[in-house]
Image (cartoon, grey):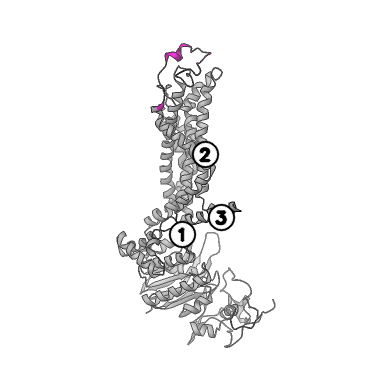
Amino acid sequence: MALLEVRDLRVVFQRRGTEPFTAVDGVSFDVDPGQTVGLVGESGCGKSVTSLAIMGLLPSRGNKVTGSVRFEGTDLLTLNDKEMRNRRGRDLGMVFQDPLSSLNPVIPIGLQVTEVLERHRGMSRKAAMVEAADLLGRVGIPDPQRRLSEYPHQLSGGMRQRALIAIALACRPRLLIADEPTTALDVTIQAQILALLKELVRDMGTALIMITHDLGVVAGLCDEVNVLYGGRVVEKAARYPLFADPRHPYTHGLLASIPRLDGARGEKLVPIKGSVADNIPWDHGCAFAPRCPNALAVCREVTPELEAGDVRSLRCHNPVLPGTPAAQEVPA
Amino acid sequence: MTSLLKRKQQRVDALAESAGTSLAADAVRRMLRSPVALIGAFLVLLFLVLAIIAPFIAPKDPYQRYPELLEDLRPDFIPGPMPGFLLGGDELGRDFFSRLLVGAQQSLIVGVGATLIGLVLGMLIGGAAGAFGGWVDSWLMRFTDIMLSIPSLLLAISIAALASRGSQTTVIIAVAVTTVPIFARLLRGAMLAQRHSDHVLAATALGVRRRTVVFRHMLPNSLGPVIVQSTLTLATAIIEAASLSFLGLGDPDPSRAEWGLMLGNSQRYIDVKPELAFYPAIAIIIVALGFTLLGESLREALDPKNRR
């Protein structure tokens, strides 16, 4: 049994007087201790909603979450608000995208670290402060003792994200969800933060769910990758097969749209045409079909199922053949 | 050239300074640099000091009728300045200057009292609405909407008139009630914005207790506009209290030294000695102006958009 088993997770947003919108549509994946699982996709594919659903942080009204999220055998979706509060921060940690807005601007960093220690580990303020300085030091913040009394706006972007990671890992949660943790940072800091996450996850045996649209992050960090499109997993594979041999046209397109160091000079990037449609896309045929260079007639009529193979699971009627070069731009 | 260099150095110094300060210290620094804020602060400070020490520095007893002033008092003549009486007498032969001074204290008591009561009640209502949301929010906000829909002076007059016998306390309560919905709406709005902020979500994701989320993460971040509003409310509270006294809805004791009452009583003597109306009116205006200037510059200083 895996540490976290997400089965057929479905999140439907419904407001009075509007059509229901399925943001996450039957997503399943497992995460083992010490393993890093990536959820990859472009904006609106449902990756952040998936993470909020696992954490139980979706607003209490206006949405319906079905399926199951088993954490050490307990279905988190059946827990009440109080039970979830006791688990959040202790068993489940989360790091958000924007480190400045994720910290409370009016209280010092130290208090924000000790808060979670006092809450979940029952430490006194004094003991928690000592522990907090230790934690900040461990995530690579220089002079942690001084930083404890400083306010978020006095820290640099990279340091803020380090502080947030320290807070999220303060109680040694067994699962950490990182929702685009490097998007708001510049490239050199990104690399440092990723290295830090990798190290901490390895040392503490924490399971990590990495949510990103950045395939570079995936390549550097993830053991297993789930590529999401329109709220469904379209391709699921270990890191190497996915990058070496992407089979779903969407994955293939994502990789083709990244500049390569070994590409020829003047070689054009190949974008994926169009953008994610925000209607309910999977009812009749494949949601990616309108943008897909490989689309067949069947793609627009029959909804493809996720078919498990030896190295990967794939949801496609007409996958890209192994070794196909980047698709050429099709005239519209 | 040198001045340019100097200015550059100053800016670097300022930046270095700001690196080691909190939000509040930053706001104070910006206030000190704004002339409007300094004028406002000066007027408010002057008013506060005078109001507090008024009974001790008043040259004469403000309630005593002095024979020197009564001597020449006729329906068509009220004595002007004379030795010992800086601004002369009022319509009943009392020392006008001492009464003006002591009036500052009355205004301060009413203004601060009404604002404090309004602030506490308004924050309770707005805080509850913002913290609980849902139907609690709906009901409390409909209630404040009703109160807001009545013009504040009309509301204050109605409340003051309800009391069987007017007094200082009824004036304070009447003015306080009119400020409650403003504070309630303001705090509720700020709390609502905080509820959807990233750092509140982050705190929730750490399993922090609801109570802690509200009191440590939502409330302190929502106080800025409320602080500004209470400064501005002090100005309107003083004006409204004066209006109530002017209309005779305050303490019926005619000897009381209170600016609004003095203004009301001097109406009949406006041809005889216009200063009797002029000085209390000017005093009210200056105090209200002081609080308004201070409040407005406070609003600017606390606005995160104005941060360099």
| Three-letter residue code for mark 3 | Lys
Label 3 Cα crowd, 10 Å radius (few <14 / some 14-19 / many 20+): few
Q: Can residue B164 be seen in this snapshot?
A: no
Query: The disc numbered 1 marks a residue on which chain?
Result: A
Q: CA distance from mark 3 to mark 1?
A: 22 Å
Q: CA distance from mark 2 to mark 1?
A: 31 Å
Q: Which residues are magenta?
A: B57-84
**Residue A91, image quadrant:** bottom left
Query: Which numbered disc covers residue A21?
Result: none
Q: Who comes first in sequence, dot 3 or dot 2?
A: 3
Percent coordinates x, y for residue B209 in the rendering: 36, 59
| Three-letter residue code for mark 1 | Gln
Establish whether labels 3 and 2 are both on one chain.
yes
Percent coordinates x, y for residue A156 in the rendering: 48, 63
Label 1 Cα crowd, 10 Å radius (few <14 / some 14-19 / many 20+): some
Query: The disc numbered 2 marks a residue on which chain?
Result: B
Q: Look at the magenta stretch and give its main secondary structure.
A: loop
Label 2 Cα crowd, 10 Å radius (few <14 / some 14-19 / many 20+): some
Mark 2, residue position: B39
Mark 3, residue position: B8
| Three-letter residue code for mark 2 | Ile
Q: Is residue B110 above or below residue A159?
A: above
